[in-house]
Image (cartoon, rainbow, N blue to C red):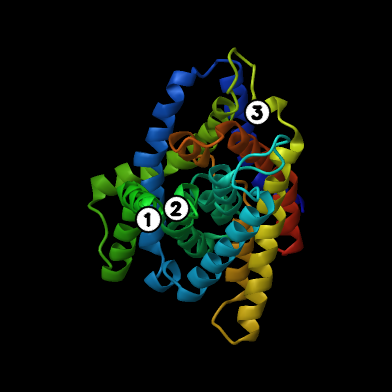
Amino acid sequence: MQEILSVTVPFFALVLAGWLAARARLLPLEAIPGLNAFVLYFALPCLLLRFGARLPVGELFDPVVLGLYLLCAAVVVAVTMALTRSADGRATATGARVGQKDAAFGALVAAFPNSGFMGVPLLVALAGPAAAGPTISSVLADLFFTSSLCIALAQWQPHAHDGSALAAAGRSLRAALGNPLPWSIGIGALMSATGQGLPGPLDKVVAMLADAATPVALFTIGAVLWRSGQAGPGPGDSVAARMPPSRYLPVALIKLALHPALVWLGGLAAQRLGLALSDFQLAVLVLVAALPSASNVSLLAERYGADNGRIARIILASTVLAFASFPLLAWWLQVQPG
């Protein structure tokens, strides 16, 4: 357990450092989008490209891994929608149940782990370079499937036939194609398949940016969590902070408990059916599912007019709770830091 904590504690400590820096205004809130852009468009794509280039293509696009992860994500979305959506599609007075749009974004935050900014570097540090394959597969699945499904559900009206849900899903898919992460993964896979590398100077630039990805991404997560929670009219006055726990804590628990449990049970079933899923791949997928919610979901919720304060609170709660739950699960799975 001590070896696991020696890996996980620094990762969560960097998230806390970013949160404290934003809270103390040492990091101006206006600078957070710039940090986020640096990670998303420069550092993280270089990190994923390097991992993709070093892994066999079959490990990046394993159909069993992708199928298991997609199935469990769909179940998490369905369960979260069923447990949180009000019968008439409207928010209730207590907020324990919410309307269609807020339920859909709650489902997205329950099924979408922070596998890009946090998961890839953390799981590689925890379980070795081979963990990159299943983790990167989950990134692709969430970017193209989970987010598109939940955005379509957020726009869906049971008695409407205007195609708004399909249009929203299409916009989500186009946004995923505009995201640099899938393209960097694809370029890395192409390099792996062809055995071609980057020219020396360019490879050095990519390596330098990749080395910056982990600390800056984790620091940015903390800053984004602080900014997202500031929905009130004045500094430090957060509407999210005044929410009753019944509005956000159940979804955070779905993320950290139900999601990894479903992946574990589904993986055991796949192995019993004779599908090619190793114990190592299953353990990595379970840990991916046990990561806290992706911080960028709050930005999507704001863009589509959902209750961003509730989503921010779910993300914050899952991140805080994962500080304890994630290393405990890694210890239970007997993961050996690589």
Q: What element carries label 1?
A: helix
Left or right: residue 183 compared with residue 73: left
Is residue 338 at least partly visible in the picture? no
Residue underneath mark 3: 240
Q: Three-letter amino acid code at disc 1?
A: Leu
The nearer-to-camera label among 2 and 3 is 2
Q: Position of residue 119 (x, y in %)?
A: 55, 51
- Location of the C terminus by quadrant is bottom right
Q: Three-letter amino acid code at disc 3?
A: Ala
Residue found farthest to the left? 199
Marks 2 and 3, how far apart in space? 25 Å
Residue underneath mark 1: 166
Residue at point 64%, 31% (across, down)? 16
Q: Three-letter amino acid code at disc 2?
A: Ala
Q: Is residue 41 above or below residue 203?
A: above
Q: Which of marks 3 and 1 is nearer the N terminus?
A: 1
Cβ atoms at labels 2 and 1 below 8 Å apart:
yes
Q: Which of marks 2 and 1 is nearer the N terminus?
A: 2
Marks 3 and 1, how far apart in space? 31 Å
Left or right: residue 172 compared with residue 70: left
- Residue 78 picture quarter: bottom right
Q: Position of residue 260 (x, y in %)?
A: 66, 60
Residue at point 36%, 54% (across, down)? 163
Q: What element carries label 2?
A: helix
- Residue 281 picture quarter: bottom right
Q: Residue 152 carries which label?
A: 2
Circle 2 packing at 10 Å, graded few (<14), some (14-19), many (20+), is many
- Location of the N terminus by quadrant is bottom right
Residue found farthest to the front? 159
